[in-house]
């Protein structure tokens, strides 16, 4: 791997041509086969209504807050924790959109219909309204808006009904972003759930897609405030031992969204050097997939892959080797998405589907 990294250092070269604004239009490009989608759908179907084990991550105000997960979260109580349940639902909808004739399509619809009722979403909204302002901020918020975006763009009668049910919760989360971001003076640069760049990227996609201009403008303003002066991101500090997001790559793919193409290319040259990018040519090594924190590193490889695939398209292939690096990270963890260890299996398939769809 040292030799491969050296080759990348010598061959990563920047270009300067102009590209269009990089909200890319081909979400299903080449990366996902029906058989893989079917296998991953089984993982989400198995856990989306599996109530236990469950990590509620809530603050108890008094004894009345001690309720079963399905009572607290009538739509999203499965898959170990709230955000994993949300992105499991997102994954099933993404798969249905791409493969409407999948043999499991009817079962997927039945399961989604069980979750995404008007009453269940009203229960989720009621929980948000009484929960701590920081609950699921911003990782869970981001996936909820990604789910809403996926439903919004689905030309399907049942899908549109589910979108209508989900929309009040999506609007509430949008308002939480709008009110919170001015109060967050500094971005969170961790490689786990609170990472600001990740949380803003998915929210920006939603705002752009549904035409939520207040949210879109707020994200643009805060992203520029947080990151526009950043240079020489310290890639060699990654990964930490429980990362599932790359702080440097998440920041780069957010800025690719909010900056005009020419401005982004100029910013990117200062932010990630060829030597720094070559660092990502060595995927994270996952030593124990039964450990709920160490297995995060499989997610890191998959999220690195989707960032690098995205950046390669935004940069029109002008930075040589990005797709190769992305592919190496993808393949390092793709075979380990479905294992006997619930610690990873309850969430990694969603990361894999998103990465494959960025190819």
Image: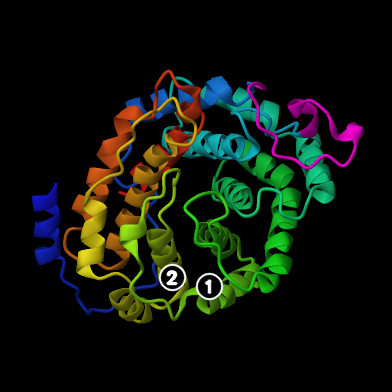
Q: Residue at x 56, y 67 (%)?
A: 187
Secondary structure under the numbered disc 1 in the rendered image: helix
Location of mark 2 (residue): 255
The number of discs equals 2
Tell me the number on the disc at residue 318: none
Q: Residue at x 54, y 20 (%)?
A: 46
Judge by depth and name the residue closer to the eye, 104 or 244. Answer: 244
| Image coords of residue 14 (percent x, y) | 19, 73
* 1 and 2 marks in contact (CB < 8 Å): yes
Judge by depth and name the residue closer to the eye, 46 or 62. Answer: 62
Judge by depth and name the residue closer to the eye, 61 or 126. Answer: 61
User: Colour mode?
Assistant: rainbow
- Toward which corner of the image does residue 208 lie, by quadrant? bottom right
Rendered view: 135 above or below 48: below
- Toward which corner of the image does residue 116 lie, by quadrant? top right
Name the side, left or right, on which 167 lies relative to 150: right
| Image coords of residue 230 (percent x, y) | 42, 76
Name the side, left or right, on which 342 lies relative to 186: left
Task: Answer whether residue 62 is magenta in the image.
Answer: yes
| Image coords of residue 164 (percent x, y) | 71, 46
Q: Residue at x 60, y 39 (%)?
A: 86
Q: Residue at x 69, y 60 (%)?
A: 174
Q: First in sequence, mark 1 or 2: give its number.
A: 1
Highlighted range, magenta: 51-72
């Amino acid at each position: 791997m040292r030799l491969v990294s050296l080759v990348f250092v010598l061959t990563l070269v920047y270009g300067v041509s102009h590209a269009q604004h990089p909200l890319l239009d081909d979400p299903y490009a080449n990366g996902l086969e029906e058989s893989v989608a079917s296998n991953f759908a089984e993982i989400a179907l198995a856990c989306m209504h599996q109530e236990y084990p469950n990590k509620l991550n809530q603050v108890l105000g008094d004894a009345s807050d001690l309720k079963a997960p399905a009572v607290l979260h009538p739509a999203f109580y499965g898959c170990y924790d709230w955000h994993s349940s949300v992105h499991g639902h997102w994954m099933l909808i993404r798969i249905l959109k791409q493969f409407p004739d999948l043999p499991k399509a009817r079962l997927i619809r039945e399961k989604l219909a069980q979750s995404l009722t008007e009453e269940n979403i009203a229960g989720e909204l009621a929980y948000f309204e009484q929960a701590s302002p920081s609950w699921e901020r911003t990782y869970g918020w981001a996936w909820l808006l990604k789910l809403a975006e996926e439903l919004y763009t689905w030309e399907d009668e049942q899908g549109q009904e589910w979108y209508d049910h989900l929309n009040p919760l999506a609007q509430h989360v949008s308002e939480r972003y709008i009110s919170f971001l001015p109060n967050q003076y500094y971005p969170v640069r961790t490689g786990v759930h609170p990472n600001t760049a990740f949380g803003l990227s998915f929210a920006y996609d939603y705002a752009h897609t549904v035409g939520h201009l207040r949210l879109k403008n707020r994200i643009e303003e805060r992203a520029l405030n947080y990151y526009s002066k950043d240079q020489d991101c310290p890639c060699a500090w990654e990964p930490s031992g429980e990362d599932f997001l790359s702080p440097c790559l998440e920041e780069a793919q957010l800025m690719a969204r909010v900056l005009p193409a020419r401005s982004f290319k100029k910013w990117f040259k200062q932010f990630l050097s060829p030597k720094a990018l070559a660092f990502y040519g060595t995927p994270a090594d996952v030593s124990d997939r039964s450990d709920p924190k160490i297995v995060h590193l499989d997610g890191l490889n998959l999220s690195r892959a989707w960032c690098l695939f995205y950046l390669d398209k935004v940069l029109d292939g002008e930075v040589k080797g990005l797709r190769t690096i992305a592919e190496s990270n993808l393949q390092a963890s793709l075979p380990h998405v479905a294992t006997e260890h619930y610690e990873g299996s309850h969430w990694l398939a969603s990361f894999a589907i998103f990465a494959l769809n960025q190819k």
